[in-house]
Structures are given as C-alpha cells and as structure tokens.
Image (tube, rainbow, N blue to C red):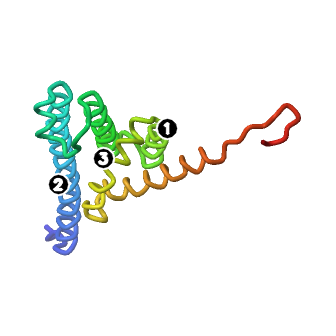
Amino acid sequence: MAAPDQEACVQELLHAADRMADGLARVAEEMRLANKIRVRELFAEQMDRSIDDAVLAAALSTLRDLPAPKHRQMLFANKHYSLLLLAYEARELDRGELLGHLKVLSRNAVFAEYWQLTSEHRKLLPWESLEARTGRAVDVIMDERLDDLEEWWVVDSRGESR
C-alpha cells in the first residue's frame, strides 16, 4: 500500500483553507452590510418621527431658524439623499445610477436649498468617506445645474437670440 503524497495533501488543505477564508470574508462583508442597513433603518425611523414632530426635529437637526414646513422639507430631502446612498452601498445602484438619480434630484428646488444649507456639514466629513466623495460629485452636479440655468436665452421667431 502506497503512502499518500504528503505534499499533495498539504496543497489540497491549503487550497481548502483559502476557499474557506474567502467564504468567511464574503460572509463578514454581508454581515457588515446588513448591520449598516439596519442602522440606516433606525436612522430613517428617527427621521420619520422628526418630520412628523417639530419638537423631535429640533433635537435631530442642526438647521435653525426655519419655519416648521421648510424644516420638514429639509429633513425629508436629507432622508431621500441618505436612502440613495444606502441603495448604492447595498449594491442596488451602481455609481452611474446613483449620480443619475442625484442629477435628477438636483433639479428639485427643495433639494437644491437643502444642499446649500448643509454645505458646511459636508466639509466636516472624512475626505475619503462615501458621503464626502458623493458630496463632491453632487457639488459638481449643482454647479453644472447653475451653469445650465445661466445658459438659457430667448430665441425669437427669426431664430435670433435676444
């Protein structure tokens, strides 16, 4: 009876250990994502309560001196933006889709006002965080939006601009 090739057995065990490590890394990543989604769900629940209750909104929001209806709009804009980020993190949107949704959202006057009012908040984020990187992209989108608005002109029936 021949003895098994010890080196082949060791190689097979090493390959099996690599596959297990890869599987555990994927499970850990999925657990991290599930935890992040749960935390965002809790955040969204708090936002819902603060949108419905001005007293809670004052405790949650750093935006001051806004009439209650405007404050509710800003909280809702923040929630919508946060949900888009979550959809990206959960791999429901790719980067292009995320930026596409944000480009459409940038056309909304309430979101544009929210974005302007919270510009100082984004400066405090870690430079390489998802929110900071996305915020810089939305800043560019907002600048392009303003450029687009400045390029409008009136054309008369002869095709000449006025």
Q: Residue at x 14, y 40 (%)?
A: 60
In space, the residues marked 3 and 2 are separated at their CA atoms by 20 Å
In space, the residues marked 3 and 1 are separated at their CA atoms by 23 Å
In contact (CB < 8 Å): disc 3 and disc 1: no
In contact (CB < 8 Å): disc 3 and disc 2: no
Relative height, residue 12 to residue 51 (above, below): below
Relative height, residue 154 to residue 94 (above, below): above
Q: Which residue is mark 3?
A: 89
Reading the chain from its start, which is encountered first: label 3 or label 1? 3
Q: Quadrant of residue 45?
A: top left
Q: Amino acid at mark 2?
A: Leu
Q: Residue at x 85, y 37 (%)?
A: 159
Q: Which residue is mark 1?
A: 107
Percent of width and height locating residue 140 = 48, 55
Reading the chain from its start, which is encountered first: label 3 or label 2? 2
Camera-nearest label, 3 or 2: 3
Q: Quadrant of residue 137?
A: bottom left
Q: Residue at x 28, y 60 (%)?
A: 129
Percent of width and height locating residue 141 = 49, 50
Q: Amino acid at mark 1?
A: Arg
Location of the N terminus (image quadrant): bottom left
Percent of width and height locating residue 23 = 21, 53
Left of 93 or right of it: where is 9? left
Reading the chain from its start, which is encountered first: label 2 or label 1? 2
User: Which of the two residues, 137 or 29, is positioned nearer the viewer here?
Assistant: 137
Q: Residues within 10 Å of mark 1 (few under 14, many from 20)?
A: some
**Which numbered tag is attached to residue 24?**
2
Camera-nearest label, 3 or 1: 1
In space, the residues marked 2 and 1 are separated at their CA atoms by 43 Å
Camera-nearest label, 2 or 1: 1
Mark 1 secondary-structure assignment: loop
**Which numbered tag is attached to residue 38?**
none
